[in-house]
Amino acid sequence: MPKTASDFAASGYTEANSLPEPVMVFSETELQIFQQARLARDARFDGRFFVAVTSTGIFCR
């Protein structure tokens, strides 16, 4: 991965040829458990999942 602006220009690096983001598939039951944990602010789930609003760039636990 290029480290400087000139490295980016010389390499032809773009987001289009970067690695795709991992995709995780959860069952409906798991999603319900995550939702309940989030609403209850259950500390047992700290660091296990996160919720993000991509349009604002704000990430919340």
Image: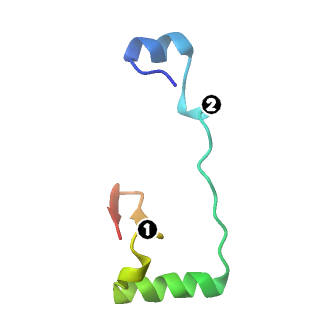
Q: In the rendered structure, which disc, 2 or 1, sits on the residue that comes first in sequence?
A: 2
Q: Position of residue 54 (x, y in %)?
A: 42, 57
Left-right relation of 23 to 4: right
Query: Is label 2 in a helix, a strand or a loop?
Result: helix
Residue 9 lies, with reference to residue 19, above or below; the image says above
Residue type pointed to by label 2: Asn
The residue that appears at 43% across and 85% down in the rendered structure is 37
Instruction: List the residue tagged with mark 2.
Output: 17
Spot the residue most to the front: 44
> What numbered label is drawn on residue 4?
none
Residue 46 lies, with reference to residue 23, above or below; the image says below
Judged by depth in the image, the label closer to the viewer, 2 or 1, is: 1
Residue 31 lies, with reference to residue 60, above or below; the image says below
Residue type pointed to by label 1: Phe
Between 43 and 32, the residue placed more toward the observer is 43
Instruction: List the residue tagged with mark 1.
Output: 50
The residue that appears at 35% across and 71% down in the rendered structure is 61
Residue 7 lies, with reference to residue 47, above or below; the image says above
The residue that appears at 35% across and 62% down in the rendered structure is 59
Estimate how packed mark 1 is, as few (under 14), some (14 to 19) or many (20 or more) residues with alpha carbons within 10 Å.
Answer: few
Q: Position of residue 48 (x, y in %)?
A: 47, 70
- Evaluate if marks 2 and 1 touch, with contact meaning CB atoms under 8 Å apart: no
Estimate how packed mark 2 is, as few (under 14), some (14 to 19) or many (20 or more) residues with alpha carbons within 10 Å.
Answer: few
